């Protein structure tokens, strides 16, 4: 499992993304939060 | 204590000034960040381990000085989240700051990968190099660790919500910074290529740098509209700018300006106000900044604001109260400076009184001087 796949799993299981648009929104948000 | 009338007047005052118009009085904006810790008598370590102390430190600044709006009421970074990831660029000394020399985690020849898929590249490559947790080989252990880190992140967001509630309900101070973003090239500078790497890239492969900025811009823009879908009265999107002070106008025009102008135009068209924080001196870039849209506020550190106001009539101006004077000057020195700012910058509107720098270190301001200038502007800044 790549880190990207792990984050997709987190989005699905914890943020309850229901469609591609939701998933895309969270991918962008969580990517930004990794720039620390 | 919350008072609807004065609270809304503060918001309207901020809104009018930020839209480059004339409010009833020059608004007084709080740009105190880590200074709150030393002022309240806490260390960074103490507040990161005690949420109540964390809140109290920032609340003390809101309660002890008069303000029309404030930018900070918690640390700007989720420290425990970053700790749980096991790395990061922010260093915890007496204040929380980016520390150069710990940033480099992307090679000069990796721009194509960044451009092709910025999300996969940042998550799989940059973040893996940056954080110990993401180097974990046991997938379930790594996932569990990431879930714990995110728990810390959402606790931090909850703390921010509580801080906002207290700012409003207890201190009657609007928090006017609901959203922020870094320009893509500042993201590359601060979190991927470090200073020397970024400066070399700008010289050696400017087209790649500009292309990467264009791609990353979409992430910045989408995060804003997804999580702050509509402008709120009196509020602004905060955009601290780091690298332009080091760039010639020619290089700025090649690598920074196209994407900067693009996002500022898009945000302005949607009715947002953006406050760009121009760190150090930007006079060499005024020919570009003149082209920025309405709904832009410029917070300038070292520029001559009298000249800035004349040349950049397209934007509202914030700042001017010199931190050095606030710490080393007498109370009268500080009041004289505040009076000069009001006399010269308030006419015509579009001026927000605040410090010329974000207050971080204990010697960024003396409390009695800060109180004196805020009271002076509150009493003498009427139109």
Image (spheres, coloured by chain):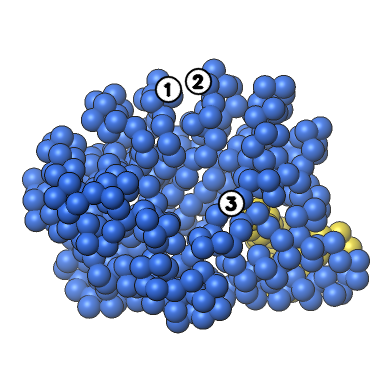
Distance between mark 1 and mark 2 Cα atoms: 7 Å
Above-or-below relation of B351 to A9: above
Residue B14 in the image: x percent, y percent?
Answer: 25, 52
Label 2: chain?
B
Q: Nearer the viewer, mark 3 or mark 2?
A: 3
Q: Report the residue at 19% width, 73% height from top.
A: B3
Residue B298 in the image: x percent, y percent?
Answer: 35, 39
Q: Which one is earlier in the sequence, the residue at label 1 or at label 2?
A: 2
Q: Colour of chain A?
A: yellow
Distance between mark 3 and mark 1 Cα atoms: 25 Å
Viewer can see residue B174: yes
Q: Report the residue at 19% width, 51% height from top.
A: B330
Label 3: chain?
B
Q: Judge the density around disc 1: few (<14), some (14-19), many (≥20) Cα neighbours within 10 Å.
A: few
Q: Nearer the viewer, mark 3 or mark 1?
A: 3
Secondary structure state at the residue bearing disc 2: helix
Secondary structure state at the residue bearing disc 1: helix
Find disc 2 in the rendering and name its residue.
Answer: B249
Find disc 1 in the rendering and name its residue.
Answer: B284
Viewer can see residue B373: no
Find disc 3 in the rendering and name its residue.
Answer: B98
Q: Report the residue at 40% width, 67% height from top.
A: B38
Distance between mark 3 and mark 2 Cα atoms: 25 Å
Q: Are marks 3 and 2 in contact (CB under 8 Å)?
A: no
């Amino acid at each position: 499992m790549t880190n990207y796949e792990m984050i997709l799993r987190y989005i699905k299981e914890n943020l309850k993304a229901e469609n591609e648009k939701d998933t895309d929104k969270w991918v962008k948000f969580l990517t930004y939060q990794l720039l620390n | 204590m919350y008072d609807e009338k004065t609270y809304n007047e503060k918001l309207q005052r901020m809104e009018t000034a930020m839209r480059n118009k004339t409010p009833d009085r020059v608004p007084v904006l709080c740009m105190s960040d880590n200074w709150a810790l030393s002022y309240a008598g806490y260390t960074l370590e103490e507040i990161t381990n005690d949420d109540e102390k964390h809140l109290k430190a920032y609340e003390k600044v809101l309660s002890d000085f008069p303000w029309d709006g404030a930018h900070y009421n918690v640390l700007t970074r989720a420290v425990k989240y970053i700790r749980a990831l096991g790395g990061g660029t922010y260093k915890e000394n007496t204040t929380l700051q980016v520390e150069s020399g710990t940033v480099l985690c992307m090679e000069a020849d990796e721009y194509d990968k960044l451009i092709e898929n910025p999300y996969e590249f940042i998550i799989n490559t940059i973040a893996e190099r940056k954080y110990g947790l993401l180097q974990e080989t046991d997938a379930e252990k790594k996932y569990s660790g990431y879930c714990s880190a995110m728990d810390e992140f959402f606790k931090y967001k909850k703390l921010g919500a509580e801080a906002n509630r207290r700012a409003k309900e207890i201190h009657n101070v609007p928090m006017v910074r609901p959203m922020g973003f870094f320009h893509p090239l500042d993201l590359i500078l601060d979190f991927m290529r470090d200073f020397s790497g970024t400066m070399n890239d700008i010289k050696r492969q400017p087209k790649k740098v500009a292309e990467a900025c264009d791609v990353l811009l979409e992430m910045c823009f989408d995060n804003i509209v997804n999580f702050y879908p509509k402008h709120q009265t009196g509020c602004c999107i905060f955009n601290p700018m780091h690298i332009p002070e080091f760039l010639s106008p020619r290089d700025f025009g090649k690598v920074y300006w196209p994407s900067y102008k693009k996002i500022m135009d898009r945000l302005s068209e949607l009715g947002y106000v953006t406050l760009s924080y121009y760190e150090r001196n930007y006079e060499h870039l005024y020919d570009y900044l003149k082209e920025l849209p309405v709904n832009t506020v410029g917070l300038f550190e070292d520029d001559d604001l009298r000249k800035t106001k004349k040349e950049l009539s397209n934007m509202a101006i914030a700042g001017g109260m010199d931190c050095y004077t606030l710490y080393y000057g007498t109370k009268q020195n500080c009041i004289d400076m505040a009076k000069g700012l009001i006399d010269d910058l308030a006419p015509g509107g579009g001026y927000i009184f605040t410090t010329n720098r974000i207050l971080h270190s204990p010697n960024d301001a003396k409390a009695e001087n800060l109180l004196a200038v805020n009271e002076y502007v509150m009493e003498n800044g009427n139109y």
